Amino acid sequence: MAKKKKIEGLVDFAILSMKYKTRLTKKFVNRTQYAAPIPNHVLSYIPGTIQEIYVKEGQKVKAGESLLILEAMKMRNQIAMPHDGKIKSINVGTGDKIPKNHLMIEIE
Amino acid sequence: MSLKKHILDLRKRKEQVQKGGGDKAIEKQVARGKQTARERILALLDKESFTEYDLFVEHEARDFGMDKKQLHGDGVIIGTGTIYGAPICIFAQDFTVEGGSLGLMHARKITKIMDHALKMRVPLIGINDSGGARIQEGVNALAGYGEIFYRNTMASGVIPQISVILGPCAGGAVYSPALTDFVFVVDNISKMFITGPGVIKSVLGEEISMEDLGGARVHAEITGNAHFFSDSEDECFEQIKKLITYIPWSNSKKAKVFPPKPSKFKGNIEDLIPSDPKQPYDVRDVIRAIVDNSDFFEIQELWAANIVIGFGRLNGETVGFVANQPLVLAGVLDCDSSDKAARFIRYCDAFNIPIVTLEDMPGYLPGVDQEHAGVIRHGAKVLYAYSEATVPKVTVILRKAYGGGYIAMNSRHLGADFMFAWPMAEIAVMGPEGAANIIFRKDIEEAEDADAMRALKVQEYKEKFANPYVAAAKGYIDSVIEPNETRKLLLHAIEVSTDKDDHRPDKKHGIPPF
């Protein structure tokens, strides 16, 4: 008779309405949780360096106007205002190296 | 010069060049825990089988003082030999010569042995240990890489191509291994990345070590770029030799047939599996219970472990196994496991290796991250690979076969030649709980005791639908079998499909969802 081995490290894992006992992978555990985008947050879409900032906190800006230059891969990328609004805060300074999805500017 | 003198002169020249970058550079190589390029080739090939070509090749670079530099063999060794008698073409970059950097003549040597391998229809093994392009040679170095990639692609699916990463392999250079069939890495020695820690730091300010960025473990566990992981070069060479025994020399041949051996497993296979479909087990135990000598050679063991792939033998003949692994993530299909299975299925199909699929899976993995990562496109690769394959295809449904997973895992509908199911198999559009909740929603809602009604309806659904007989009644399953008959029936299935002749519409090539 084959002896059933005691299996370590099992957790509950739900697929639809069934709950399975299984192990998880590191990749699954470390996956990024989804967060709905916030329209008032201007995030970096690529890692890079802030070259110039054209706006000030408290300033009213129209949609499409240039907020700053994010240089990445030898390209000067214009970051434009997504919609009409007032600049609530600027969280980067000229020369800053920032990662992807970094909160650069908050709008109110 | 007398004849003797000519011979002595040749010996002297050979000896000089065979020292590669010289004693000091060799010392450094050894201090890094690495073998020299020549030692590696000799360790891998059968004793005294190695024959070297292009030993006296020299580079032609003139700029940046290169005209004053002599680089022995231009930093790469090429030749032919055998592994357990199988003919092999091989190249090994020599890190002791100018950091194994790739210049035009270095690349010419590699493409020469690649052309030879393709013409002679023998496997190609490339040992990579190189600092990258030889900057002084400029666009000539880039040309060299491009010509290697082109040949990798031309040889793909014709001869087996094996890449062994025994040092740095960075920038464009990593695309050659990525185009080959199997990539071997060794802990603390292999390093693969497109942009290194230096560039990442200067662009992003992120600090990361080479090991954490692109070390052996990263590629074996996280990226899936590597297929075999080992702790030492010697262990790595043993893995390569073993792989060579399982695969044919080219796509016009079959893998070598070994003397048949029974499985070492004694007992009842069904005892390996819990009857509750929610309880896990290690599907590799089932494979070992089936294959000759219980010898299963697993590929990509550490990556996307929710699916298991690898080679075993049935009656001495190589068979590729694809099996859901309930032990990890309940055996779901997701982006990574789909990629892993699909590529392996295509490998087996290209090289005339029958495929046995062992199915026990609850479906595709739900989640925003999966959907946004393109699980539709990735999952479709499995359907494509199975449908396209013309080698003998056998499926055994062990327990769960729900929904899209049932279709994907080499179902009859995708062209399976033999469909077996164990009697405890649950073939259904979804798990009994989910199905009962939808079909009998009204009954459950209106019942006085909703939970009791749900349990009743789940049971009812289980008995009526979550079994193999509904599918068997339609001929979607050929046989419902006792678990202990599995090996016998698989041997039979493989035996009667030896001369399988199946065709696909003529085309230049398909367009799989890459």
Image (spheres, rainbow, N blue to C red):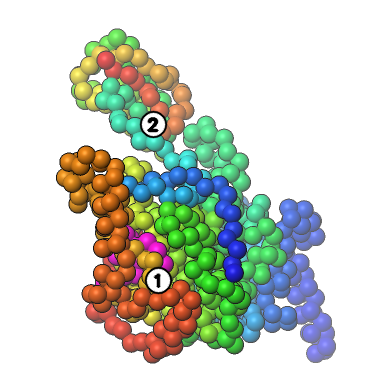
The answer to whether residue B219 of the structure is visible from this angle is no
In which quarter of the view is residue B465 placed?
A: bottom left
Density class for disc 2 (Cα within 10 Å; few <14, some 14-19, many ≥20) is few
Residue B293 % position (x, y): 60, 78
Residue B64 visible in the displayed image? yes
Q: Which numbered mark, 2 or 1, is in the foreground of this view? A: 1
The residues colored magenta run: B398-414
| Residue B415 relative to residue B443: left or right | right
Looking at the rendered image, the quarter that the N terminus of chain A falls into is bottom right
Marks 2 and 1 sit apart, C-alpha to C-alpha, by: 50 Å
Q: Nearer the viewer, residue B505 or B378?
A: B378
Please tell me whether residue B4 belongs to the stretch shown in magenta. Answer: no
Q: Quadrant of the C terminus of chain A?
A: top left
Q: Position of residue B242 (x, y in %)?
A: 61, 74
Tell me the residue that label 1 is attached to: B422
Q: Which mark is residue A101?
A: 2
- Residue type indicated by callout 2: Asn
| Residue B510 relative to residue B357: left or right | left
User: Chain ID for label 1?
Assistant: B
Q: Nearer the viewer, residue B42 or B415?
A: B415
